[in-house]
Image (cartoon, rainbow, N blue to C red):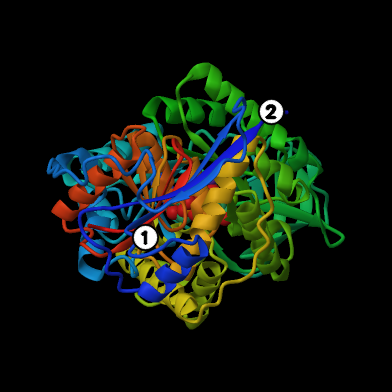
Amino acid sequence: MAQALSLSISTSHSPKPLISRRSPPLSTAISRFSFTKNPIKTSLFIRASASDPNPSVLTSDNGAGSSAVQDRAPFPVVSDSSSIEVDAVTEAELKENGFRSTRRTKLICTIGPATCKPEQLEALAVGGMNVARINMCHGTREWHREVIQRVRRLNEEKGYAVAIMMDTEGSEIHMGDLGGASSAKAEDGEIWTFSVRAFDSGLPERTINVNYEGFAEDVKVGDELLVDGGMVRFEVIEKLGPDVKCRCTDPGLLLPRANLTFWRDGSLVRERNAMLPTISSKDWLDIDFGIAEGVDFLAISFVKSAEVIKHLKSYIQARARDSDISIIAKIESIDSLKNLEEIIQASDGAMVARGDLGAQIPLEQVPSEQQKIVQVCRQLNKPVIVASQLLESMIEYPTPTRAEVADVSEAVRQRADALMLSGESAMGQFPEKALTVLRSVSLRIEKWWREEKRHEAMELPGIASSFADRISEEICNSAAKMANNLEVDAIFVYTKTGHMASLLSRCRPDCPIFAFTTTTSVRRRLNLQWGLIPFRLSFSDDMESNLNKTFSLLKARGMIKSGDLVISVSDMLQSIQVMNVP
Ligand SMILES: Nc1ncnc2c1ncn2[C@@H]1O[C@H](COP(=O)(O)OP(=O)(O)O)[C@@H](O)[C@H]1O
Ligand SMILES: C=C(OP(=O)(O)O)C(=O)O
Ligand SMILES: [K+]
Ligand SMILES: [Mg+2]
C-alpha cells in the first residue's frame, strides 16, 4: 500500500530564550535529535498520508530551514480570556497549588434526597464532583429532571463543568419499596412473605413485594434468599400461590428496592435472570428521557453481552444522530464477567459495580475481579469507574473506617479513572465529608505513587484499527514517556473528538493533561478520564496560533506562567512539540 510517513524535526526561535529550570533532561533530549546551540523550541512532526509519493523524508534544521511553525509571528497578545472555558474548581486549584498537585482521579457522586438541593449540589461541585449520577432505580423522572436542570444551571451560572450520568434500573430481581418506609428490620426467626401480588391498600405487615412475576414459580422450598448479597438472609419454607413464606436466618435491615438473589445447593440460581432483558421496557423509557435531557453518560445495569450495548448504540444513533452520549457498561453479574472483553470493547467505559457483583460471586473474589476489570479497561482504552461501598460507614458516621480508606487507596493505586459514591452521597448524613475523603485520599496516594516513581509496567497493547490511528497512538505513548523523562509541567492536547486526550490519559503520565476541545459535550465527557483537565477552546488547524492563543489566555487567567515546560500534541497536525511557556 502506498502509505507514506514523512517525518521532520525542526526548531524555531520564539521571542524568549529558553532558560529551562530543567536544562539537563531537555538538553539530553535535544542532543539525541542532534540539535546544536541554543535551541528554543523543539517540534517533531509526523505526517501520514495515503498518497504521499515521497516517503520517509527526514529533515532536521536548526531554525534555518522552512517549517510550518517557525515563520509565524511569535506569540501575538490575545487577551480575550472569555474564549477559553475551564471549570471554576480546577482553575482555583491550579492557581493555588500549581500543575503537579491537581487531582488525577475523577469523582462521581450519586444524587439523592441528601444532595438534590441547589446549595447541596453546589457544595459537591466545589468539593470536586466531576460527574453527578442519577439512579433511575429510585425517584421519578420529574425528580431526576429537576436535578439535571439544577446541575446545568450551576454549570452555566457558576462555571462548573459537572457531567451527568444516568444509571438504568435494569431488570434483575429486587424488592419493591417498603410502602413508604425508609427501611424495615427483619429479626432472626421471623416469618416474612415475599409476594408478586399487587396490594391495593398498603402492604400487610412483614410483607415484601418482589418485582419479578416469575418469582413464586421459580423458587423452591429450601432455597436461600439473599437480600443485597447477604445483608439479610431468609430460607424459603412454603409456597402459597403468589406468596412465598420465608424464615429469616440472618437478621438485618431491609432497604427499599434491595437486590434479591436465590441460592440452591450452594449455587446462585440465575437461569431466570439470564432470561430477563438487560434493558427493560421501563429502562427504554428512561433512556429516551436521558437522550432528551442530553445526559453525558448512560450507565447500563446488568449488562450480559456486547450485543445489548451495540443494540443500544444503534438505537441512540437512529434517534439522535448527532448525539455523543457515552455508554458505560456496569459489570455486576456473572455473565458480564464471562463476556468482559467484548462488552468493554463495545462500550465507551465500564463500571466495577461491586454492590451487585458481590451478590453474584463470592465476596473474596471481588477484589481480583476489580483489578482485572480496571486492567482490561486500561488496555482497551476505556475509562473505568470503581463503585459501591467505598465509604459505606460514612452514610452514618463523619469519618471513614481505616479499611475504607485502604479500599479507596487501592482503587487509586490501580489508577482507575474514577471513584463513585452511592448511598454516601445519595442519602447519607455526610455527603460533603465523604467527597472530601475521596479527594484527599486520591491526592495523597497519587502524590506518593509519583514520588516513589512506582510506575507499574503495564503492557499497553496496540489498539488502533487504522494506520492513522496507530500514528496517534504512537505519538501519545511517546509524548507521555517524554513528559515523564523531561519532567514537564503539563501535556497540552488539541483534540476535536477527545480521542488523543484519552490515549494520553491511558498512559497515566506524571503530569496533568490539558485537553483543549471545541465542543462543550466532548469537554464534559472528558471529565470522567484520569488526569485530564478539559478546556473548551475554539482552535484552528494552525498549531502555532493555537499555542499562542492558549498561552496568552491561560497566562491572562494566571493558570500558567512563563517558563513552565509543556509538551503539546494535536490530532490535526500529528506532532509533538516541547517548549517553555514564553
Ligand atoms: N433519587 C433517589 N431518590 C431517593 N433515594 C435515592 C435516590 N437515589 C439513591 N437513593 C438512595 O440511596 C441509596 C444508595 O443509592 P444507590 O447505590 O445508587 O442505589 P441502590 O442501593 O439501589 O443500588 C439507595 O438505596 C436509596 O435509598
Ligand atoms: C453501582 C451499582 O449499581 P446500583 O447502585 O445501581 O445497584 C452496584 O451494584 O454496585
Ligand atoms: K441502577
Ligand atoms: Mg447494581
**Image: 334 above or below 428:** above
Q: Quadrant of residue 378?
A: bottom right
Amino acid carrying label 1: it is Ala
Q: Nearer the viewer, residue 469 or 440?
A: 469
Q: Position of residue 431 (x, y in %)?
A: 34, 62
Amino acid carrying label 2: it is Ala
Query: Could you say which disc has been placed on residue 6 in the image?
Result: none
Q: Residue at x 25, y 70 (%)?
A: 97
Instruction: Give the SS element for disc 2.
Output: loop
Query: Could you say which disc has been placed on residue 2 in the image?
Result: 2
In primary-sequence order, the first of circles 2 and 1 is 2
| Position of residue 117 in the picture relative to residue 527 (left or right) | left
Q: Nearer the viewer, residue 147 or 344?
A: 344
Query: Could you say which disc has been placed on residue 490 in the image?
Result: 1
Q: Residue at x 55, y 72 (%)?
A: 410
- How crowded pointer 2 is (Cα within 10 Å; few <14, some 14-19, many 20+) is rated as few
- Quarter of the figure with the N terminus: top right
Q: Nearer the viewer, residue 317 or 470?
A: 470
Instruction: Give the SS element for disc 1.
Output: strand
Can residue 255 be seen in the rendering of this structure? Answer: no
| Position of residue 401 in the picture relative to residue 119 (left or right) | right
Q: Nearer the viewer, mark 2 or mark 1?
A: 2
Q: CA distance from mark 2 to mark 1?
A: 36 Å
| Tag count | 2
**Image: 383 above or below 169:** below
Q: Position of residue 23 (x, y in %)?
A: 36, 73
